[in-house]
Image (cartoon, rainbow, N blue to C red):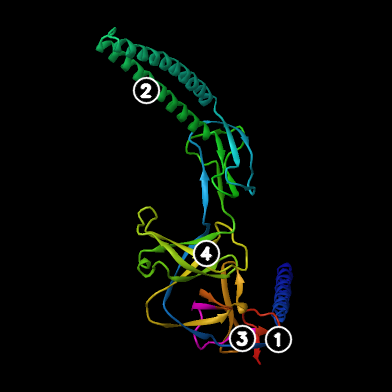
Amino acid sequence: MKIRIKTIKIVAALLITSALFMSCSEKNSASIPDSIVINVKVATPTFNQAKGYFSASGQIEAKQFANISTRSMGYIAQMYVKVGDKVKKGQALIHINNSDMEARKAQAMAGINQAEARLSIAEKDYNRYKVLFSQRSASQKELDDMKAQYEVALAQVESAKQMQNEVEAMLSYSNIKAPFQGVITSKSVNPGDMAKPGQILLSMETPGSFLATAMVPETDIGHVHAADTVTVYLKSSGNSIRGIVSEVSSSSQLSGGQYLVKILLLDTPQTSLYSGMFVSTIFPTDSKSNKQIMIPMEVLHKKGELEGVYTVSSSNTAILRWLKLGRPIGDHIEVLSGISADEQYIISAEGKLYNGVKININ
């Protein structure tokens, strides 16, 4: 009897669980009603007839910039500027405390004084012996010896002055000045730090005057020539700038098979330029014309690094298709893959689009 009661309880529990599961399934299926239909407008890709091209990545650089270093070693006593400061040519930037050079300067000055004193004595002796020689009171050898001593003393004065010039040149590296008018863009030291020969202390550049660089692979460098007109796209904003090739490197030995190309910017961009901004430069080639599939940039849907459009399936539902995109041209962008030329994509909708939602094409 007890066994039958337990069996009935188990069966009842299974029936209740099954009923709950069916109820939950009905609720889940009801969360996406089949009656939802979104009205949409669609279009097909357009074509752009263009010559062959290739793109190369690079960045924005200032036309005039400098990494400022020193040849002397010492502690930084004073730093007169900070990042973002505007400076004039010759303005003091950094003072390095170099007591060794100061001591050498004092020695050089003392050496000059001693050499000039010896020169004065040697010159007087030489002049006196010239008079004695004219009076036949001194021999030719004695006169030659006095002349030699005078010339040695004269050379010692010149040597001491050269030493002074050398010390003063080294001291000039302790008082670092701006080489041109510009803006301080970075600094790598602070007061109290030890400055070493060759170490970059500050960087500065001339504001408002920029060029673009591009690293072109060896497979494409043959298409690039000086004075070529190119299009530079700012990756941060998508804005385009006309440019002209000013320099083409003839060696890639130090750049890993990439050739450096410099481009002068001809147009004023709509957004501000800053050194280090990443760009993509479009270089034309001599290849035959080809057709490019284009879509408006405003219809793109983004998810992280992915970009795509909603297309229309055979059952009239929306399908999100991820695309591989090329260069932008105006308010359109080239589609390299992901959608065919005769495939419809949704340009506007009267509701929120998602994969699988039914649509009605107006």
Looking at the rendered structure, the kind of residue marked 4 is Val
Mark 2 vs mark 3, foreground winner is: 2
Callout 2 crowding tier (Cα within 10 Å): few <14, some 14–19, many ≥20: some
Q: Are marks 2 and 3 in contact (CB under 8 Å)?
A: no
Mark 3 vs mark 4, foreground winner is: 4
Q: Nearer the viewer, residue 144 or 245?
A: 144
Q: Are marks 1 and 3 in contact (CB under 8 Å)?
A: no
Percent of width and height locating residue 28: 70, 77
Magenta residues? 333-347
Give the secondary structure at mark 1. loop
Query: Which comes before the other along the chain, label 3 or label 4?
Result: 4
Looking at the image, residue 27 lies above or below residue 222: below
Query: Which comes before the other along the chain, label 4 or label 2?
Result: 2
Q: Which residue has dot 1 on it?
A: 36
Work out how far the residue at label 1 is from the one at label 4, CA to CA, in angstroms. Answer: 44 Å
Q: Which residue has dot 2 on it?
A: 155
Quadrant in which residue 250 is drawn: bottom left
Work out how far the residue at label 2 is from the one at label 3, CA to CA, in angstroms. Answer: 97 Å
Q: Nearer the viewer, residue 340 or 19?
A: 340
Indicate whether residue 345 is drawn in magenta: yes
Work out how far the residue at label 1 is from the one at label 2, CA to CA, in angstroms. Answer: 103 Å
Q: Is residue 322 visible?
A: no
Q: Which residue has dot 3 on it?
A: 317
Work out how far the residue at label 1 is from the one at label 3, CA to CA, in angstroms. Answer: 11 Å
Percent of width and height locating residue 255: 40, 55
Mark 1 vs mark 2, foreground winner is: 2
Q: Are marks 1 and 2 in contact (CB under 8 Å)?
A: no
Q: Which residue has dot 4 on it?
A: 279
Looking at the rendered structure, the kind of residue marked 1 is Ile
